[in-house]
Amino acid sequence: MKIKLILQLALAACSLSALGQGNNNTIAVYAQAKAPLRQSPYIELPLGAIKPEGWLREMLIRQKTGATGNLDKLYPLVMGKRNGWLGGDGDLWERGPYWIDGLLPLAYILQDKALIAKVKPWIEWSIKSQRPDGYFGPANDLGPEPGIQRDNAQDWWPKIVMLKVLQQYYSATGDKRVINLMTNYFKYQLKELPTHPLDHWTFWARYRGGDNLAMVLWLYNQTGDKFLLDLADLVHKQTFDFTNAFLNTDLLSTDNSIHGVNLAEGMKEPAIYYQYHPEAKYTDAMKKGFKDLRRFNESVPGMFGGDESLHGNNPTQGSELCSAVEMMYTLENTLAITGDLSYADHLEKIAFNVMPTQIDENFINRQYFQQANQVMLTRAVRNFDINHDGTDVCFGLLTGYACCTSNMHQGWPKFAQNLWYATPDKGLAALVYSANEVKAFVGNNTEVSFKEETNYPFDETIKFTFSSKKSVSFPLSLRIPEWCSKASIKINGADYQQPSGNQIVKITREWKHGDVVELSLPMHVFKKIGYENSISVQRGPIVYALKIGEEEKVVKTGKDSIDYGISFTEIRPTTPWNYGLIRVADNKLADSYKVENIQAVSANPWTAANAPIRIKTKGRRIPSWGLYNESAGPLPFSTIWNFETAKEEEELILIPYGCSRLRITQFPVIDKR
């Protein structure tokens, strides 16, 4: 009865929030799995329960003042009042829902009234668009118009994105209309999918059906409606079989075998279905899929070559921005469902390397593709699977293709939303690290908070300060990353444990107001062997890259401005880039790679000028290694002998990958003879 009463109070509070009469996102009883679904080890907290601080909050503020908060003004052709998801006669496919999929969590995490007001018309129109048969969204195709997508209105795919938006809206507000819409829409899907399957209009939903499935299972945990389990099996059956592809085919070792964003977004499907059918083959498929991605395709730190189709691990192949944010979301889902900590390590690697470098510091212009070895950002045709008139690596609002303009907004807000999780044993888990404050219910439904203070990933220490009106017993779980040889944990200044990496430390105790937990994660330099036997340099979760001087040039687009924007920025090198690193034994890396903290961590540390840390080492130029199609030419195979290099060694400065725009990340290795 007590739990039932608390749930009723929580829903009442959420309803008030939905009506604009208040907002208390921490009042909630965290939904656990209903039989026969498997209980996941980690449970997402309500949207808004985690308040980012430090540099992560600054990223969200820059999104607010940049493209995320103003895309209707910056990109009015698509995101203005004509958008089909506002009832207009304009773009009616994926781009509007993509934008709101990032804008909505940003608005509610920041509790920004202006952003919430910008989100609401999209939510209201979507809910009110539902027909008696359950269908919702734009319904009628319109004639072609340059720069917008006005066909395939009934396609399942854009509805999948809007379902994600509505689920987040419910998490933030408790608006019961979302439950009603989803229930009626999923009844419509169960009726229509047998004759109009996921790939009836376009192939996208077939590859991305895992997100549809996730929303079906989420709703089942809210309502317990049995028809949803039948729909779950049907959606799984119609979705591309990633389980078999990963376990039994050469999909991931074959170039051009699959579209990169379809892979990044869709590959979570085995983990999603595992909640309903907890068979080892589904988690085994995920493990093998990521292992093969790393082996055959990973070049950009944490990401794979996919420009647009899968394209191997040559560090000059492109990696699409949409793939990065979708892979982060896939990892966040898979981590919570499986509890496998390798997904948290991978998530941090993308967040701290790939994300910051592919969007400019004002969060307006972005690259469509980025390269691990990226030495010239100019309008030119490169060795990509698809070239969009040579604009793909230039920084611009619409360069490359406009899907990333619409989809890039979800990366940081969802990362912030997944720093903490509730656990089934009524505790909390900090699985990914950044400064924040979380409010949640633990133990016997006691409201508590932790303030997490850190400059991670630039710093090794993380301080958690506990606050509560009364003492309460519950478990606190802390992740020790795989790269950390030996961590240390102190509680109120006293040594508690020195755990090794790749494990969860669960601290179960009676917590009192003011308790402090200090987690230290010592970082060391290590190297990875990659394409053509090259090496990359890493320390903790950060990959380091050669610092290259830059010269910017703003270019007017001209006649193709509808496709690529009014202008874009080219960047050319002003210092040499064609260096190899001197071979160093693993046990001598600390002597040859000198880590220097050069300035305090600023509000935005993700620029070359603001990089708070650097590594000094030695290298030699390789004269034969030059440009090819305005990219770094074919990477010389390591090992390289002295006579192929310049005579003199030079001091090289390596900075965090996420702080770079031009860079060499995978270096040839020079043997001194």
Image (cartoon, rainbow, N blue to C red):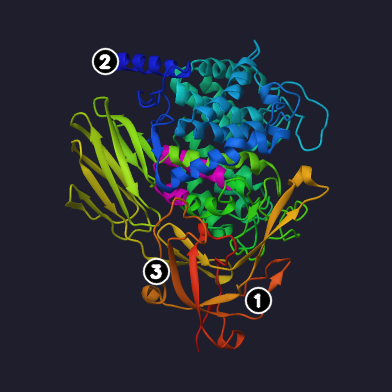
- For residue 481: magenta? no
Location of residue 527 with respect to 324 vertically, above or below: below
Q: Which residue is mark 2?
A: 2
Camera-nearest label, 2 or 3: 3
Q: Is disc 3 surrounded by few (<14), some (14 to 19) or many (20+) residues within 10 Å?
A: some
Compared to residue 30, the image places residue 596 above or below, namely below
Q: Which range of residues does the magenta coloring cover?
A: 324-348
Contact flag, marks 2 and 3 (Cβ < 8 Å) = no
**Rendered residue at 46%/34% (across/down):** 110
Q: Residue 129's x, y, as percent?
A: 65, 16
Q: Which of disc 3 and disc 1 is earlier in sequence? A: 3
> Which disc, if any, is residue 595?
3
Secondary structure beneath label 3 = strand
In x, y percent, where is residue 652? 50, 75
Mark 1, mark 3: which one is toward the viewer?
3
Q: In this figure, which residue is indicated by the disc labeled 1? A: 625
Q: How many marks?
A: 3
In the image, taking residue 380 as reference, residue 96 lies left or right, namely: left
Which of marks 3 and 2 precedes in the sequence?
A: 2
Marks 1/3 in contact by CB < 8 Å: the verdict is no
Describe the element under mark 2 as helix, strand or loop.
helix
The amino acid sitting under disc 1 is Trp
The residue closer to the viewer here, 319 or 621, is: 621
